Image (tube, grey):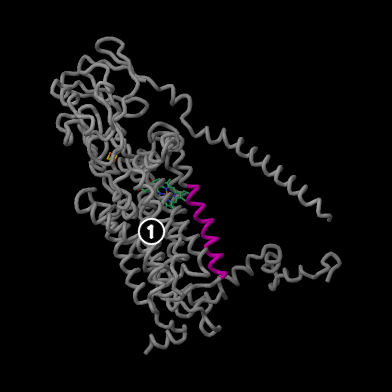
Amino acid sequence: MSDQKTPRRDFIKLATMTLGGVGAASLAIPFITSMNPGKDTLALASTEIDLSPLKEGQSLTIIWRGKPVFVKHRTPQEITDAKNTNLKDLIDMEDDADRVQNDKWLIVLGVCTHLGCVPLGQKTSDTKGDYGGWFCPCHGSHYDTSGRIRKGPAPKNLPVPPYVFLNESRIKIG
Amino acid sequence: MSSNDPQGYKKTLNSPYTGLKGWIDSRLPLVRMMEAEYLKFPVPKSLNYFWSFGGIAMFCLIGLILTGIFLGFHYKPSADEAFDSVERIMRDVNYGWLIRYLHANLVSFFFIATFIHIFRALYFGSYKAPRELVYLFGLTMFVLMMGTAFLGYTLPWGQMSYWGATVITNLFSAIPFVGDAILTLLLGDFNVGDSTINRFYVLHWLLAFSIVGLVVFHVITLHMTGSNNPTGSEPQSWDETVSFHPYVTIKDLNATIFFFIILAFVLFYYPNILGHSDNYIRANPMVTPAHIVPEWYFLPFYAILRAIPDKLGGVLAMFGSIAALGLLPWLDTSKVRSCLFRPVWRICVLLFAINFFVLMYMGGKPAEGIYVLISRIGTVYWFLFIFVLAPLVGFLETPRQPLSITNYLKAKKA
Ligand code: HEM
Ligand code: FES
């Protein structure tokens, strides 16, 4: 075996291994993607709700994409509380005006941004936490009347799902 | 020497046996291997009952697989059917209650055996050279066990199943940037749901069987070095060993029977004592139970998770606590293995064990006030033990001269 042959063989080995690696990686794509939500799951993606039966101070929990969505008819007091919060006091700074389309209606995902529990506060009998919104019993996160995180381990505000007002008393989520 | 065997090396492959046994053995050398590794295999004379827990754990694993297969004949892995199919197993399937209670309680006893087994490794220094790989395969199995148990616990689709799965899978969302995408990929949906239970069922089987595969590696690496023993001294002659069979087989069988009598007591008198009553309520994605607690064997790690006030930090500390144990063979600088001869390290190891139970207790309590504070102290000790005490004590401590196996046994008799 002459000395020159070794680098050439090394090159062939390397090229073969690289090609094999790229091939294996591209073959893995369909398998990994197959684990993501299928078309049927994605198709369930929008829900319509009638708001008219909800009186001031009442809330409704509906299911959207398998997750609870909190629809809350806020009282004037709750609205002022949400509006008058100093942004500097917030963990995840967001103005109430950026979280609602109509001050009376707060629509947020009812999924704690810590580890995914459903916070308490929908029923009138529920504890609503130190800030009058929701309280997550799992590890103690407190949300205010705008669904913003105020205290506890959760890092983010309750997210606002995409929705539109179809008319005065009807919304479509998703 | 035949012509197609010029070096004569094949001769060494010939079986020492004759007849059918020899016929099989020269084609599949299993008989020879079993004889060498399980019948005649030399084991230090000085082993105590701590050394029985590996065998006990293996019996638990076998029991889990057998009961698991029979459960699988009746279980239906879908969000609509799972809960009812488990209730059917409990009420209508012949002896279904027995098979399910066995499966659920064997898990707890598997963890008890494994915790004792790991403590043995720490106390007698079995993790030290040349047994590092034995120890690492063991830790890997422990991680897989936790994975398998977590996946299995979601299967009955009760409230604890559902919310436990939600909280634990959400740990992945702590990963920066790609966390949510990974979470959706794992669940196959935007929340724990039908696709999730389906794949968790498959993975529950897969992980369980990969533990069996790792047992093989655990044992191969162990048989390269042989067992450690209470003295930490290697046997110096055949006189300091006994053959695996009948000495160890009988002793381990004795311990196993005793262990399974305790299991039987729990199984028949308190089958639900180690479980949570909320898991007899069907999963409800709209309502979280007021107190979510994981299974008891996860509590120490859950306490570490909650001790850290930051989401990502908590997750890292929890996984890191187990990964860090894997570094112990290299961080412990002492030349002496066994705690019997290491007065200072012995106290550190015992404190580590006590700390484990303290964390376990804290993990079951609400995450507030004094509980969080104690969890934090416990978490600090966990990492201090591995990263500071192991190197430092090994360096500063003056160990006693380890006894040989013979002298240890003499001293014990006296
Ligand atoms: C390392 C071994 C294993 C561990 C740690 C484990 C753990 C668990 C746990 C914690 C549960 C929930 C128990 C309950 O409260 O009902 C469970 C359920 C189940 N496991 Fe396993 N398992 C193991 C092996 C297996 C194997 C090998 C199979 C199948 C071949 C299996 C099949 C099942 C089935 C069908 C269920 C659902 C029925 C039920 O909830 O009782 N398991 N497992
Ligand atoms: S999941 Fe809500 S506080 Fe942890």
**Residue at horizontal 51 percent and vertical 52 percent from the top:** B209
Return the residue found at the far bottom: B414
Q: Report the chain holding disc 1.
A: B
Task: Please name the residue that numbered disc 1 is placed on.
Answer: B111
Q: Does residue B320 appear in the picture of this structure?
A: yes
> Which stretch is magenta?
B205-224
Closest to the observer, B232 or B156: B232
Question: Does the magenta stretch mainly form a helix, a strand or a loop?
Answer: helix
Residue farthest to the left, as pictured = A77
Residue A81 vertical position relative to residue B68 in the rendered view, above or below: above
Where is residue A127 shown, x and y percent of the image? 16, 35
Quarter of the image with the C terminus of chain B in it: bottom left
Which of these two is toward me, A85 or B151? A85
Q: Picture coordinates of residue B104 (x, y %)? A: 36, 52
Question: At label 1, which amino acid type do we have?
Answer: Phe
Instruction: Name the residue: 56% across, 73% down.
Output: B39
The reply to whether the magenta stretch includes residue B376 is: no
Residue shown at 68% from the left, 39% from the top: A19
Q: Is residue B223 magenta?
A: yes
Q: Is mark 1 within 8 Å of ligand 1?
A: no
In depth, the one of B220 and B278 nearer the eye is B220
Q: In what quadrant of the picture does the N terminus of chain B appear?
A: bottom right
Lateral position of residue B277 relative to residue B71, left or right: left
Q: Quarter of the image holding residue A157?
A: top left
Nearer to me, B118 or B347: B347
x 41%, y 39%: residue: B176
Would you place residue B241 above or below residue B23 in this image? below
Secondary structure state at the residue bearing disc 1: helix
Q: Residue furthest top?
A: A167
Quadrant observed for ligand 2 in the rendered image = top left
